[in-house]
C-alpha cells in the first residue's frame, strides 16, 4: 500500500496539493447502512478550516465538501466514498520568490531528495492543507465509531510554557485555542497574538482522548494499536513527539512507583491509574485512551531566515504567505480524525476476527 493510504479494512487515501485545484479522499471499507450526510462531514471541516480567528491563518477557504459516491439517500452503500474539496482561495504569488530554495523546517529538501522535484507553492502535498481531506474522512470514521459507542475528542493543553491545569471537555470549543482550561486559554491567546505581532510562532501540546474503546483492540507484535495510532498521528506534519498515558514521566520512576493494579469497576476490568493510557501490550484495556502530541512552532514566519538554494548557495529570504502563528487549534480536529480512522479500522478488524465486540 502506498504512503498516501492508511487502514486495512476501513481504508483512507487522500490526494491533492495546497495550491492545486482541489484536495480529497477516498474512503473504502465503510459498512453499508450508516447514516451519513454532507452536513455531518462539513461540521468537522468547519472546525479545521482557516480564517476563523486571530490565532489562525487568514487564508479564507470555505472547505465545502462534495460527496461524489458511496452514499445513497443519506446512507452509506458499502462502496468507496469519494470526497472532494475544491481550493478556492489560492494565492501562489507570495511563493514566487521561494522557488528554488529550501525553506528551513519544511519538507522542500526531503521531497527534492526523494523525487528530484518539489512544489514550492505552499508546500504542495506536504502542506497542512492536505489535512482537510483527513478530517473529512475522519467524519465518516466517527459515524462508524457511533455504532460501537466510542467517541473521540482533543484539546490544546499547552502553548509554549502556558499549560492547562484543568481538562474540561465542554470548554474546548468555547475558545479560539481549543483549550480545556478557560483561564489558561486566555493566556495562550495573549501569547500567540504577541508572537504574531513579532512575526514569530509558537508550538504546543495537544491531548487526544478516546472514550468507550472496548478492551481487545490491536494486533500482537507488528500491528499494535499503539503502533498504528502512533504512525497515524505522527503522519501529521507538525507532530514531532507522542506519548501514551504517563508517557515520558515513566522514565523517571521505579517499577514500584509505576505499578498499576487491575480492579473491577462496574462489572468490567480496569486499571487503577491508567498509567499506560488505555493500551497494554499493544492491545486496548477498556480504559480511556490518552495520547499527547508535541506540536512544533510553524516554520513559516515573517522574520528573515537563512538557507541555501538548489545550487547550494546561501540565501536570505522572508516568507510573505498566510500562516498560522500557532497550529495547535487546527491540529485538534486533525488529531481526532486520525484517531477515529485507526479505531474504526481496528473495530472492524476485531469484529471480523472474533465475531463480536464486548
Image (cartoon, grey):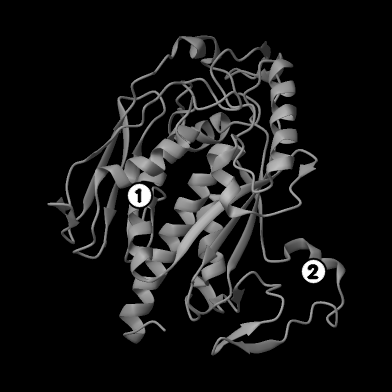
Residue placed most toward the observer, 340 or 155? 155
Mark 1 = which residue?
137
- Residue ID at (65%, 12%): 317
On the image, the x and y values in percent for residue 101 come to 58, 18
Can you identify the residue that label 2 sits on? 250
Q: Quadrant of the N terminus?
A: bottom left
Relative to 279, is 65 on the left or the right?
left
Q: In terms of secondary structure, where does tag 1 sit?
A: helix
Q: How far, Cα to Cα, is label 2 from label 1?
A: 34 Å
- Circle on res. 303: none
- Residue at the image point whose x is 64% and y is 19% from the top: 312
Nearer to the camera, 25 or 62: 62
- Percent across and percent down for residue 75 are 18, 56
Where, by quadrant of the figure, is residue 29 drawn? Answer: bottom left
> Does residue 239 appear in this view?
yes
Q: Residue at x 38, y 57 (%)?
A: 142
Locate residue 16 relative to residue 157 in the image: left or right: left
Q: Going by the image, does 220 lie left or right of 102? A: left
Establish if 12 lies above or below 282.
Answer: above
Sort mark 2 into few (<14), some (14-19) or many (20+) by Cα contacts within 10 Å.
some
Q: Residue 263, how many percent across, how many down?
A: 66, 89
Residue 8 visible from this viewpoint:
no
Along the horizontal axis of the image, is 14 left or right of 324?
left
Percent of width and height locating residue 247: 72, 63
Q: Residue furthest left?
A: 73
- Check disc 2 and report its element: helix, strand or loop: helix
Q: Crowdedness of circle 1 by 10 Å Cα count: few (<14), some, many (20+)?
A: many
Which mark is first along the chain, 1 or 2?
Answer: 1
Viewer-nearest residue: 34 or 308: 34
Q: Quadrant of the C terminus?
A: bottom left
**Front-most of residues 293 and 119:** 293
Location of residue 83 (image quadrant): top left
Amino acid at each position: 500500500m502506498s504512503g498516501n493510504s492508511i487502514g486495512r479494512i476501513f481504508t483512507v487515501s487522500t490526494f491533492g496539493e495546497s495550491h492545486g485545484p482541489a484536495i480529497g479522499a477516498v474512503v473504502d471499507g465503510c459498512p453499508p447502512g450508516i447514516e451519513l450526510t454532507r452536513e455531518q462531514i462539513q461540521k468537522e471541516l468547519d472546525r479545521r478550516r482557516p480564517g476563523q480567528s486571530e490565532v489562525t491563518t487568514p487564508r479564507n477557504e470555505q472547505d465545502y465538501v462534495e460527496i461524489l459516491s458511496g452514499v445513497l439517500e443519506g446512507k452509506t452503500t458499502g462502496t468507496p466514498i469519494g470526497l472532494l474539496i475544491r481550493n478556492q482561495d489560492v494565492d501562489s504569488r507570495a511563493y514566487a520568490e521561494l522557488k528554488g530554495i529550501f525553506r528551513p523546517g519544511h519538507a522542500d529538501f526531503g521531497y527534492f531528495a526523494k523525487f528530484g522535484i518539489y512544489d514550492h507553492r505552499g508546500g504542495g502535498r506536504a502542506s497542512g492543507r492536505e489535512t482537510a481531506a483527513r478530517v473529512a474522512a475522519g467524519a465518516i470514521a466517527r459515524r462508524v465509531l457511533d455504532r460501537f459507542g466510542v467517541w473521540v475528542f482533543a484539546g490544546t493543553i499547552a502553548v509554549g510554557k502556558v499549560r492547562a491545569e484543568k481538562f474540561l471537555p465542554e470548554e474546548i470549543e468555547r475558545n479560539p485555542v481549543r483549550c480545556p482550561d478557560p483561564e489558561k486559554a486566555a493566556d495562550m491567546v495573549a501569547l500567540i497574538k504577541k508572537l504574531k505581532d513579532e512575526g514569530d510562532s509558537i508550538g504546543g501540546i495537544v491531548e487526544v482522548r478516546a472514550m468507550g474503546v472496548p478492551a481487545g483492540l490491536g494486533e500482537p507484535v507488528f500491528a499494535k494499536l499503539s503502533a498504528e495510532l502512533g504512525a497515524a498521528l505522527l503522519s501529521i506534519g507538525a507532530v514531532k513527539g507522542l506519548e501514551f498515558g504517563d508517557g515520558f514521566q515513566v522514565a523517571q520512576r521505579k517499577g514500584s512507583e509505576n505499578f498499576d493494579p487491575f480492579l473491577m469497576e462496574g462489572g468490567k476490568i480496569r486499571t487503577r491509574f491508567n498509567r499506560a493510557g488505555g493500551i497494554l501490550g499493544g492491545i486496548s484495556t477498556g480504559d480511556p485512551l490518552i495520547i499527547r502530541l508535541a506540536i512544533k512552532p510553524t516554520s513559516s514566519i515573517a522574520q528573515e531566515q537563512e538557507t541555501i538554494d538548489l545550487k547550494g548557495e546561501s540565501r536570505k529570504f522572508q516568507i510573505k504567505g498566510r500562516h498560522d502563528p500557532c497550529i495547535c487549534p487546527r491540529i485538534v480536529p486533525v488529531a481526532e480524525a486520525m484517531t477515529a480512522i485507526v479505531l474504526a479500522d481496528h473495530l472492524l478488524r476485531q469484529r471480523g476476527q472474533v465475531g463480536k465486540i464486548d
